[in-house]
Every structure is written in structure tokens, then in C-alpha cells.
Image (tube, grey):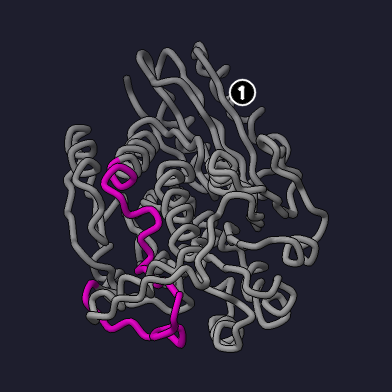
Amino acid sequence: MKVLLLENIHPIAVEILEARGFEVELRPGSLSEDELIAALADVHLLGIRSNTTITPRVLEHASELLAIGCFCIGTNQVDLAAAAERGIAVFNAPYSNTRSVVELVIAEIIVLARRLAEKTQRMHDGVWDKSAKGSHEVRGRTLGIVGYGNIGTQLSNLAEAMGLRVIFFDTADRLAHGNARRVSTLDELLAEADVVSIHVDGRPGNAGLFGAEQFAKMKPRSLFINASRGMVVDDVALREHILSGHIAGAALDVFPVEPKAQGDEFTSVLRGLDNVILTPHVGGSTQEAQEEIGYFVAGKLAGFALQGQTALSVNLPAVQAPDLDRGYRVGYLHINVPGVLAGVNQALAEQGDNVIGQYLSTRGQQGYVVTDAVDPLSDDVLKRLIDSPHTIWLRTWQA
């Protein structure tokens, strides 16, 4: 099987996949839609990061593609519904770079509160500006976290250890960590927080979540941080509130439009503003995080291709089956209608096969059943299942 890895994915992924018998091609940058279509003609597994967009047109032409690994947290760069319709599994790394993002945000809170970005720039310009004006400790101030998932909760824990009070808002029912306090509305959080940090996902409903109205409701001279998704924030509105003095400082690691390749020009209305930290989408870009992501996602891709594992897939029914150490395995992705599983078991019974284990999950309009048996399915049984109008794909493996 052939694997294509784009966007400087960590070499550990290459090592893992090659050790499992895959042929791996590693490319440094992202590809355009037309370039992807040409590159994926004979590729079975694709690895990307956040700058490569997988459209329905790309998937339509990728006839050999089995799975996509997003070597990052987000998956909004992939049309998940189109991938699921074609039975292409998508995996990501929802936990691997959590600590790296949190440490960046903690650093930014301190740098903004102390106005260190301005201080260091003036020193480089030869200006000695020894003053406490506008410089504050973070101890005792209130951090408002919007989105209390994996990153938000870990940020909550570290912030409390530094003496910050933590409040959070999330549309999901989340358990508060430590002394953190849930607030019932976003407006309540904005009115109370000295620092607002955004940690929401890339679902379409979060587009434009933070605009002029939300900035106006923040406390005067508060700080703003976005290390989630660029489309969440209206950067023009943020610029206006920074220039007016209402927002005392901001740090952004993500942007609505980001350069495609290393060294490309970065344009933003936020360039050149005092006490504004701009970083090139590096929240998870530490050596430790990238190695962990490479290890995790490569393992998921290999597990799917070689064993039919879909645990933690973001778009197909998630089945966690044990490694196949004896016998034969059949993975059957099908349209989720009554009677499909009964038909599979009837076929097995008719040929007198002994089932070792069976694992089933459904997700929306799809079902996935993994069946381990002592003997392989006969050609007649395989053809009957493959020819079923409910079949999306059927694959077999041998221990």
C-alpha cells in the first residue's frame, strides 16, 4: 500500500508506516486541489495537516484512497460527509498537542499582561523604556475560557496553579476542574473576564462567533487570545477595539486566511499594532507534540488499513476490535438498515464457520461490523455480501 504524507509531518510517522510494510512518500508542503487529484491516483493512505483542503472533487478522483490522517487537532479541512459517503475513514490527533497549545496560551497571558512584546521591540530599537505603566501580574485576575474541552480544561488547571481565577462557557455539559466556575452565557463571561481565551472547534456554527458585538461586551482594558480557529474571530473588529484602547492586547495563532507554504507573505489587519502577538499557527508545533501526533495518527492509519480498526475515526462508525492474532477478519461497512447483521451471520452459519468475535457500531446512516472467524468466507458468501445494495465496502484480513 502507498502512503502520501504532506506538510512536513514528523519522521516518526514514516518510520512507523514503513515498519508496517507501507511505501511512504513524504512531501514538505501542501497541494492544491488539482495537484492532489494528480498525486492521489494510486495512494491508499493520505496524511495532511491544516493547510491541505480535501474537497468532494478530490475524493471523487481518489479511487484507491482508504483513509485520511489529519496530523493535527482539527478536521474542518476535510469534507467529512463526502469522505464517509465513500467509506474513507478520517482520523485526527485530538489530544496529542494539547499541552503545547496550553503552554503557548499561558506564555501569551503573561507576555500580554506585562507588555513584553513592546518592551523587547523597543530594546532592539535601542530605546531603554524602564516603566511599570500598563504592566500587571496575572495573579488574582480572571481568565474566561470559551470552549472547555481537552485544551480548555488543561488551560484551566495550569491557570489556577498560577493564581488566576477561572470561569468558562461551553454549550456542552462539562465538568468544572478545580475551582473553575461555569457561567451560563457568553455575555456573562465577557463582562467578568480580564483575559478571554477561545478554544472552540471548527464546526460551521462557530464561524464569526467573535465579532464587534462580543468585543464591545468585554471588560475595558481586557486581553484577548485566539488559538482555536481563524474563522471564529472578526480580525477587523478586533483591530478597531485595540486601536480604541478598549482591548489592551491580543494574541492570535490562527487566521481566516493563512499562507499555504513556508516563507509566503502573511497579511493581516492586525500587523503593526502594539501589544499584539501574532504567531504562524504554531500552537501545536513543538517537537514533542509533532512526534506524538506522528506516532498517534500513523498508528491509526496502519490499524485501519491492516486490521480494519476505526476507533476514534471522526466520520465512520467507531469499532475497537482486538488485534487479529488468529483466523480471518471481515470488515463490512454498510448502509445502516435493519437486517444487515442478521444477513452476515446467516451467511457465516450457512458455511458452518465458527465466529471468534464480532464487533459492531453505527454512526448516522452507516453501520460497521467486524467479524473474526476461524475460516475465511467462501467466494460465494463474499460475492453475496459485496453485491448487496446496502454494501459500501467489504475487506478481509488474515492473521
Q: Residue 274 in the image: x percent, y percent?
A: 44, 81
- The range drawn in magenta is 262-291
Q: Residue at x 40, y 53 (%)?
A: 72
Q: Is residue 225 left or right of residue 399?
A: right
Q: Is 6 in front, or is 334?
A: 6
Asked if residue 268 lies in the magenta stretch, the reply is: yes
The N terminus sits in image quarter: top left
Residue 305 occupies which quadrant of the picture?
top left
Judging by the rendered image, the residue that carries numbered circle 1 is 346
Q: Residue 246 in the image: x percent, y percent?
A: 64, 80
Q: Residue at x 25, y 53 (%)?
A: 9
> From where the camera sits, is residue 314 visible?
yes
SS for dot 1:
helix
The C terminus sits in image quarter: top left
Give the amino acid type for the residue marked by disc 1 in the picture: Gln
Q: Is residue 316 left or right of residue 300?
A: right
Q: Residue 222 in the image: x percent, y percent?
A: 62, 69
Q: Is residue 226 above or below residue 242?
A: above
Q: Give the main secondary structure, helix, strand or loop, of the magenta stretch.
A: loop
Q: Is 188 in front, or is 5?
A: 188
Q: Residue 354 in the image: x percent, y percent?
A: 50, 11
